[in-house]
Image (cartoon, rainbow, N blue to C red):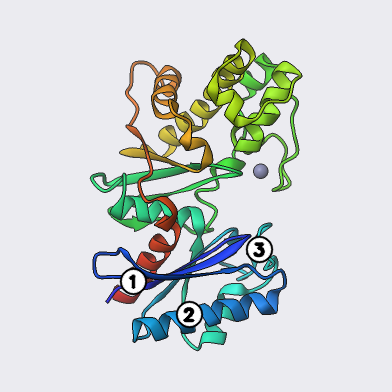
Amino acid sequence: MTAIGLDLGGTKIEAQIFDADWQVEAKRRVETPKDYAPLLTSITDLVAWADDTAGTKRPIGIGAAGLINPHTGKALTANICANGQTIHTDIARALGRDVTYINDSRALTLSEAVFGAGKAHATVMAVILGTGIGGGIAVDGKLRSGATHTGGEFGHTSLPADLVAQHGLPLVPCGCGAVGCVETYVSGPGMERLALALTGTTMTTHEIAAKGTPDAVRVWLVWLTLAADLLRNLILTTDPDVIVLAGGLSNIASITDDLARTTRDAQIGDFAIPPIVLAQGGDASGARGAAYAAWQNAND
Ligand SMILES: [Zn+2]
């Protein structure tokens, strides 16, 4: 028996049932409600559908945008209407059984570590470069959820002061409440903000990635140094065996080679860096990772 995974995002909730090989057997998707009570109902309805379809009550894993403070039980989330709510315990109460509830970036990390690009490696770090920046760390096929559940919030670490000064970049307030977070220039919207700050013109991430103009090349090279500084810090902190890239920006054609070269340049002395590879799981990663975490919890 495997488990059920729910991918809970800002626009849709998708439930997936996994077969014995952890491939998607059946799935159902609904729009994410804008109010909390209907949100809970949508989740319990999806679980009821999954129980029915699977024919048994399998463990439930939910991978969701945002964080749950393990000390208060309250959610911190900008994308779903559960901010300040004890969503994990509320879902468990509504279902009458426990569920595993983890951050969606952590869910992707576990999926890649067990089934995807990190499969052959012991310590797997995933870095998601999308609308925001997040990730996670898995060791020996298990997620390191940590004491505070904030480990993996890589986007809210600080930008490198030397590069900020060198390029005259303005310090920008971040959605998390801090100023000068990595996310403000290294996420997708951050890359566009970087283009505006460096060149005074508006460019999309597609235009920058195409490198069709000297300005686009310049923005791309500065973005690489900022992103490489993040990876360098993560390597110096955790020294993973592999770094798995995911998220919208990971679709840029040259990204793994360009980032590997720039990160090697930034690394201390002549020390190597771990391989930087692309995630393999695609859209199923979040739900599969959450389901697998639930399955691990049920079988511990
Ligand atoms: Zn921040």
Q: Residue furthest bottom?
A: 96
Q: Give percent across and percent down for residue 100.
A: 45, 71
Q: Label 1, on which residue?
A: 295
Label 3 or label 2, whichever comes before in sequence order:
2
Marks 1,2: beta carbons within 8 A: no
Location of the N terminus (image quadrant)? bottom left
Quadrant location of ligand 1? top right
Estimate the spatial distance between the alpha carbons at disc 3 and disc 1, rounded to whole Å.
25 Å
Q: Nearer the viewer, mark 3 or mark 1?
A: 3
Q: Residue at x 72, y 72 (%)?
A: 35
Marks 3,1: beta carbons within 8 A: no
Q: Which mark is residue 80?
A: 3
Relative to 290, is 153 on the left or the right? right
Q: Give percent across and percent down for residue 243.
A: 38, 38
Q: Label 2, on which residue?
A: 47
Q: Is residue 173 above or below residue 26?
A: above
Q: Give percent across and percent down for residue 238.
A: 40, 40
Label 1 or label 2, whichever comes before in sequence order:
2
Estimate the spatial distance between the alpha carbons at disc 3 and disc 2, rounded to whole Å.
18 Å
Q: Residue at x 49, y 59 (%)?
A: 147
Estimate the spatial distance between the alpha carbons at disc 1 and disc 2, rounded to whole Å.
15 Å
Q: Nearer the viewer, residue 78 or 203?
A: 203
Relative to 81, is 272 on the left or the right? left
**The residue under label 1 is which amino acid type?**
Trp
**The residue under label 2 is which amino acid type?**
Val
